[in-house]
Image (cartoon, helix red, strand yellow):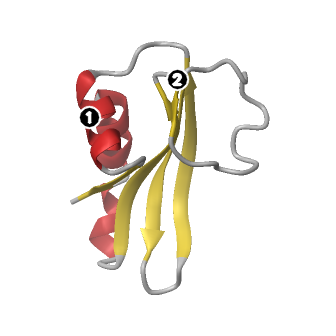
Amino acid sequence: MEIITEWFQARGRIKATNARAIAFSLAERIANKDYAKVGGVFDKTPATASTRIVQGFFDEGTGRVIEARALASMRQPSAGVVQNHTAGRGLVVYT
C-alpha cells in the first residue's frame, strides 16, 4: 500500500489546487483476480503480471483524468490493497 499512498502524497498539490480532484486506484488484476478491463494502459507490460493497477486523479468537473500511472507487478500485494480493491470491486477512492 505504501507505493500507492506515497505517489498520492507526492502529488498533494493536485488536491490542494483542485477541490474537484478525486484520488483513485482501479485494479485490472490483483493477485491474479481480474476486476476491470483497462484498455491500452498495460499494452507494454508483461501479460503475466499478477497485479495491474492504474492510479490517478480524476476531475469531477471536467470528467478527465488529471494525472495517472500504471503499476504492474509479479509481487503479492499487501493484504490492505487486496482487501480495499475487493471491497470496491476493483475501484478505490481515496479521501
Q: Which quarter of the figure has residue 86?
A: top left
For badge 2, the amino acid type reads Asn
Residue indicated by mark 2: 32
Q: Which quarter of the figure has residue 20?
A: bottom left
**Residue nearest the viewer, comparing 21 with 46:** 46
**Residue at 27% of width from left, 46% of height from top?**
87
**Residue at 36% of width from left, 30% of height from top?**
3
Residue indicated by mark 1: 83
Counting from the top left corner in percent of width and height, residue 26 is at 47, 49
Earlier in the chain: of badge 1 and badge 2, it is 2
Asked if residue 86 lies left or right of residue 66, the reply is: left
Q: Secondary structure at mark 2?
A: loop
For badge 1, the amino acid type reads Gln
Counting from the top left corner in percent of width and height, residue 84 is at 27, 41
Q: Secondary structure at mark 1?
A: helix
Asked if residue 76 lies left or right of residue 37, the reply is: left
